[in-house]
């Protein structure tokens, strides 16, 4: 049997990976970054178990091409997401670590008053 804690960690990881692969390559500019941040947040808060999400894009990393926009790169993403499955909550992040977009479980908590049956 899989615990709520394990399910929350799985759901959080799947959702963060999907977010990364869904949005990387999206056309973006410094002027449109705010609307893209909100679009990502609004899209992913709809998913089952997602209770909070915050997306910040590194505007300094947006170097316009000859048409005036950049393509969203993984290194531009700074994401915090919280997922809750029953009584278990998992908080994950995606942020730049050196030259790599690192995904991490920041913490997992399970309400102590819940007993397993």
Image (cartoon, grey):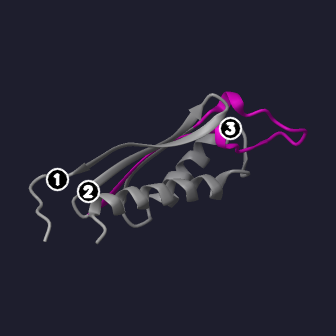
CA separation in Å, label 1 and label 2: 7 Å
Q: Residue 59's quadrant in the figure?
A: top right
Taking the image as shown, residue 9 lies to the left or right of residue 62, namely: left
Whether the residues at callouts 1 and 2 have beta carbons within 8 Å, the answer is yes
Which residue corresponds to mark 3?
A: 31
Quadrant of the image containing the N terminus: bottom left
CA separation in Å, label 1 and label 3: 42 Å
The percent position of residue 49, horizontal first and vertical second, equals 36, 63
- The disc placed on residue 111 is 1
Q: Residue 116's quadrant in the figure?
A: bottom left
**Residue under the image location 56 percent in, 40 percent down:** 102
Q: Please tell me how crowded label 1 is: few (under 14), some (14-19), or many (20+) other residues with Cα within 10 Å.
A: few
Q: Which residues are magenta?
A: 57-85
**Residue under the image location 43 percent in, 56 percent down:** 12
- Indicate which label's residue lies in the foreground, 2 or 3: 2
- The disc placed on residue 88 is 2
């Amino acid at each position: 049997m899989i615990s709520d804690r394990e399910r929350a960690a799985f759901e959080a990881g799947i959702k963060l990976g999907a977010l990364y692969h869904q949005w990387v390559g999206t056309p973006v500019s410094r002027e449109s970054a705010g609307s893209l941040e909100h679009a990502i947040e609004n899209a992913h808060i709809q998913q089952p178990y997602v209770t909070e999400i915050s997306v910040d894009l590194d505007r300094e990393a947006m170097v316009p091409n000859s048409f005036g926009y950049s393509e969203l790169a993984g290194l531009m993403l700074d994401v915090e997401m919280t997922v809750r499955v029953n009584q278990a909550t998992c908080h994950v992040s995606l942020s730049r670590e050196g030259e790599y977009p690192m995904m991490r479980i920041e913490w997992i908590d399970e309400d102590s008053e819940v007993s397993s049956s």
